[in-house]
Image: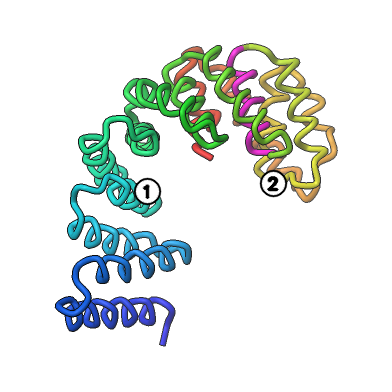
């Protein structure tokens, strides 16, 4: 039996068990089982199935904003940003001060291309939650509306909270590059590329930052592990095209600053 079939069988078995015993244990017992199983399935990466189970749990206690937040996060992970947005809005109607719901709503708006709305909500959520993820999402939103200085500030906070994370440092370097602070961007990317945690995507961004800083010869010659010459040349040409984009928001999209790590 495949993993998918096992998951489906487990889900059906648990739903059947809940139907048989609901009279004895009440809705809270059914909800506890649903949440436990949904959490396990969500951790295994089957976000769509987990979202269906969170939805059922939220129906049992519709006035609990925390359940709608969990449902929204699962929907986001499953790639359904529109449905996630509805879940987070429901949570906020129940608890307008819920920072996790505000973060989720801003993230959904960011994924849906509503960057201005995302800035509005993430600007409130990030200081409350104060995590690298929250600040990075705010930074991406600022970048996508052309607010380079604000993007740099947000990514700086994310990097301060996780100073050895190559993704946080790369986002900050890209924000510096977008804001025209090339020397800071290059210095950060050298720091990233020296890290034992650096991966292929970080070296690709090193090439991008070097070309945008007009260090094309260095981009051609700098040591990069396991990067074929044709791939390097393709990245250099792509970076040169990005450098020709005048609009900051359009350049941010081309640079990949819509990252939400």
Give whichever of 251, 14 is nearer the camera. Answer: 14
Closest to the observer: 232 or 181? 181
Instruction: Please provide percent x and percent y for residue 175.
Output: 59, 21
Residue 200, numbered circle: 2
Q: Decide: few, some or many residues near mark 1? Use Cα within 10 Å; few <14, some 14-19, many ≥20.
A: many
The answer to whether 5 is drawn above or below residue 156 in the figure is below
Q: Which residues are magenta?
A: 166-179
Residue occupied by mark 1: 73
Which quadrant is home to the C terminus? top right
Image check: 72 left or right of 244?
left
Residue at image location 61% in from the left, 25% down from the top: 157
Report if the CB atoms under discs 1 and 2 are less than 8 Å apart: no
Residue closest to the far bottom:
1
> Could you say whether the residue bearing mark 1 is in a helix, strand or loop?
helix
Q: Quadrant of residue 109?
A: top left
Q: Position of residue 64 (x, y in %)?
A: 25, 48
User: 206 or 149, which lies in front?
Assistant: 149
Decide whether residue 170 is among the magenta residues.
yes
Give the residue displayed 63% in from the left and 26% down from the top: 172
Q: Residue 227 in the image: x percent, y percent?
A: 75, 47
* Residue 188, image quadrant: top right
Disc 1 and disc 2: Cα gap in Å?
28 Å
Classify mark 2: residues with Cα within 10 Å, few (<14), some (14-19) or many (20+). Answer: few
Considering the whole magenta stretch, tell me its main secondary structure.
helix
Which residue is rendered at x = 38% and y = 33% of the image?
99
x, y percentage for residue 218? 82, 26
Q: What numbered label is drawn on residue 227?
A: none
> Helix, strand or loop at disc 2?
helix
Q: Earlier in the sequence, mark 1 or mark 2?
A: 1
């Amino acid at each position: 039996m495949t993993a998918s079939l096992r998951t489906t069988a487990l889900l059906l078995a648990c739903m059947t068990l809940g139907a048989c015993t609901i009279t004895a244990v009440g809705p809270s017992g059914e909800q506890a089982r649903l949440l436990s199983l949904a959490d396990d399935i969500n951790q295994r990466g089957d976000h769509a199935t987990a979202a269906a189970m969170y939805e059922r749990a939220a129906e049992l206690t519709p006035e609990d904003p925390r359940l709608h937040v969990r449902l929204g996060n699962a929907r986001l992970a499953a790639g359904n940003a529109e449905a996630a947005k509805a879940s987070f809005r429901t949570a906020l109607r129940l608890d307008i001060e819920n920072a996790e719901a505000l973060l989720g709503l801003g993230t959904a708006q960011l994924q849906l291309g509503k960057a201005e709305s995302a800035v509005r909500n993430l600007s409130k959520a990030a200081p409350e939650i104060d995590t690298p993820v929250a600040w990075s999402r705010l930074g991406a939103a600022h970048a996508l509306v052309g607010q380079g200085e604000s993007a740099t500030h947000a990514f700086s906070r994310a990097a301060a909270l996780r100073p050895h994370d190559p993704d946080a440092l790369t986002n900050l370097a890209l924000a510096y590059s977008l804001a025209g602070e090339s020397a800071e961007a290059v210095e950060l990317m050298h720091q990233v590329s020296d890290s034992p945690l650096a991966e292929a995507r970080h070296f690709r961004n090193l090439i991008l930052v070097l070309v945008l800083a007009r260090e094309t010869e260095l981009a051609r010659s700098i040591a990069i592990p396991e990067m074929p010459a044709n791939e390097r040349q393709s990245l250099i040409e792509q970076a040169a095209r990005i450098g020709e984009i005048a609009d900051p928001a359009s350049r941010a999209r081309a640079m990949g600053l819509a990252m939400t790590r």
